[in-house]
């Protein structure tokens, strides 16, 4: 099961008032485990970055002015996410910004049902507790010390670890590994050779009739070796 852990950084809180995306980070996971494949890009928002936003992610107007526009990276982004589920912390926020950018390009919107909101899921799983990304890292003992500021790719990488814990992915992987080891152990334990082969239950006439039938099949009879001493043709 391929999923995309996704995060964005923006100039503000509302694309309807002119705020834009300045960074996109995506991490590919298969069965809750990060594969190492990712998509990351800084984007020129074609406007100034307010001080409030700069304090959150540290991306300045000066830093972003020579970065590509969203229209220049949109197709690469869409190609990377494909048609797979998007896993986002506070999905409504990121989805409204992505769809606002896609709308400017005349591209179809990403359906809301395509996004899995880890914030909503965490609130159901841990009601009454803080479920921010930092709080979930503390709960699941995930190191987030490098997260001194928000960053789309960094936050997506951390969310990938949180997501695996939320969904029980790591435990499921361990259980599967243990079951495989037990299965292999049982298989080896039961593999025994008889000291004296069992006598055939077929009569000589039945063995002869079977041999004649196999003769009609020619070399396709792969079990010929088990009823005759003659080697099967290669």
Image (spheres, grey):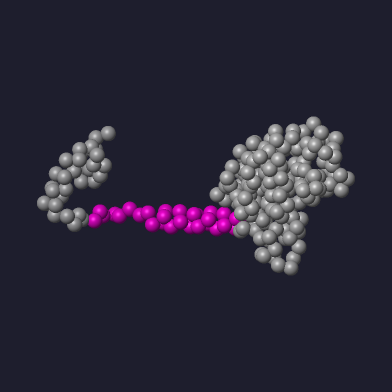
Q: How many marks?
A: 0
25 left or right of 83 in image = right
Q: Residue at x 80, y 45 (%)?
A: 18
In depth, the one of 77 and 226 nearer the eye is 77
Q: Residue at x 57, y 45 (%)?
A: 83
**Image coords of residue 20 (percent x, y):** 77, 43
Seen from this angle, which residue lies furthest top? 66
Q: Residue at x 48, y 57 (%)?
A: 182
Q: Is residue 127 above or below residue 204?
A: below
Q: Is residue 127 above or below residue 63?
A: below
**What residue range appears in magenta?**
169-198
40 left or right of 232 in image = right
Seen from this angle, which residue lies furthest left? 205
Q: Is residue 20 magenta?
A: no
**Image coords of residue 133 (percent x, y):** 74, 55
181 left or right of 155 in image = left
Q: Is residue 175 magenta?
A: yes
Q: What secondary structure do most residues of the magenta stretch adopt? A: helix
**Is residue 183 visible to us here?**
yes
**Is residue 39 visible to us here?**
no
Give the position of the C terminus as an image quadrant: top left
137 left or right of 47 in image = left
Q: Residue at x 17, y 55 (%)?
A: 202
Seen from this angle, which residue lies furthest bottom? 128
In depth, the one of 69 and 234 nearer the eye is 69
**Image coords of residue 166 (percent x, y):** 65, 58
**Image coords of residue 4 (percent x, y):** 63, 47
């Amino acid at each position: 099961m391929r999923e995309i852990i996704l995060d964005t950084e923006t100039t503000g809180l509302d694309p309807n008032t002119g705020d834009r995306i300045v960074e996109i980070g995506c991490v590919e996971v298969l069965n809750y485990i990060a594969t190492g494949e990712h998509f990351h890009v800084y984007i020129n928002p074609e406007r100034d970055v307010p001080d409030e936003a700069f304090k959150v992610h540290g991306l300045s107007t000066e830093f972003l002015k020579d970065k590509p526009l969203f229209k220049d990276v949109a197709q690469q982004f869409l190609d990377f996410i494909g048609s797979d589920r998007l896993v986002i912390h506070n999905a409504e926020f990121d989805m409204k910004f992505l769809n606002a950018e896609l709308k400017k390009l005349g591209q179809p919107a990403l359906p809301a049902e395509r996004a899995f909101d880890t914030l909503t899921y965490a609130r159901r799983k841990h009601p009454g507790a803080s479920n921010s990304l930092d709080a979930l890292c503390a709960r699941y003992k995930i190191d987030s010390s490098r997260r001194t500021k928000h960053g789309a790719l960094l936050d997506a990488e951390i969310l990938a670890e949180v997501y695996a814990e939320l969904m029980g992915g790591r435990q499921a992987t361990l259980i599967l590994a243990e079951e495989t080891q037990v299965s292999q152990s049982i298989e080896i334990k039961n593999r025994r050779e008889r000291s004296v082969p069992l006598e055939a239950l077929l009569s000589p006439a039945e063995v002869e009739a079977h041999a004649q039938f196999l003769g009609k099949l020619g070399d396709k009879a792969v079990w010929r070796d088990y009823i005759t001493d003659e080697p099967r043709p290669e």
